[in-house]
Image: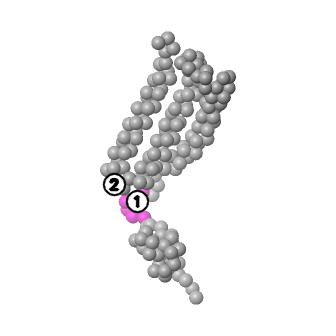
Amino acid sequence: MSTDTNDLVVPSLQAHTAKGLGTGNPADAFVVEPARARTKKTPRRTRTNFEMLAWLFMRLSGVVLVVLVLGHLLINLMLDGGVSRVSFAFVAGRWASPFWQVWDLLMLWLAMLHGSNGMRTVINDYAEKDTTRLWLKGLLGVATVFTVVLGTLVIFTFDPNI
C-alpha cells in the first residue's frame, strides 16, 4: 500500500477549519501545508530579514538586561543599607559618574526597545485589521521614542543643585 505524499497535504482552508482530512481523527487537522510556489511578485531574496534580526535582538538584549537589572537591584536594594539610602542625593551621586549614567542609559534603552519589540509582536499576532495594526504600532513607536528621549534627557541633564 503506497501513500502518495500529496494525499497527506491539506489545502489551507481545510487545515485552518480543523476539519482535517475528513477521517474523523482530530490530529489530521495539523497536517503541514505544502510550500507556496514562487510567483513573479515573490522576491527571490531580501537584503535583510527584519524578523530574524528582531528575534536575535530580543535574545541578546534579554541577556544584557538580566545583567544590568540584577546589578541595579543588587546595588540599589541590597548593599550598604538597601532601600533606605536611596534618595535624591544618592541618585545625584550616582549620576555624577559617567559609568552610572551609561549603565542606566543602557538599561533604559534596552528595556524600552526590548519591551517595544515584544509589544510589536503581540500587535502583529492579535490585531486583525491592517489599519488597527498600523495605528497601534504607530502609537507604540511614539511612546517608545518619547520615553527614550525623555529618559535620556533626564539622565544627562540631571542637576543635583535644584
Q: Are marks 1 and 2 in contact (CB under 8 Å)?
A: no
The earlier-in-sequence mark between 1 and 2 is: 1
Q: Nearer the viewer, residue 7 or 26?
A: 26
Dot 2: element = loop
x and y percentages locating residue 82 in the rendered image: 64, 26
Q: Residue at x 34, y 45 (%)?
A: 135
Residue that lies at the very extreme toward the right in this rendered image: 80
User: Predominant secondary structure in magenta?
Assistant: loop
Horizontal and vertical percent for residue 69? 60, 34
Crowdedness of circle 2 by 10 Å Cα count: few (<14), some, many (20+)?
A: few
Q: Magenta part of the protein: which range? A: 38-43
Residue 136: name its quadrant. Answer: top left
Residue highlighted by disc 2: 129
Mark 1: secondary structure = loop
Comparing labels 1 and 2, the label whose residue is closer to the camera: 2
Amino acid, disc 2: Lys
Tag 1: amino acid: Thr
Residue occupying the point 47% across, 78% down: 21
Q: Tell me if 102 is positioned left or right of 48 in this view.
A: right
The color scheme shown is: one colour
Neighbour tally class for label 1: few under 14, some 14-19, many 20 plus, Cα within 10 Å: few
Q: Which mark is residue 42?
A: 1
Q: Is residue 94 left or right of residue 6?
A: right
Residue depicted at 49% across the width and 18% down the height: 158
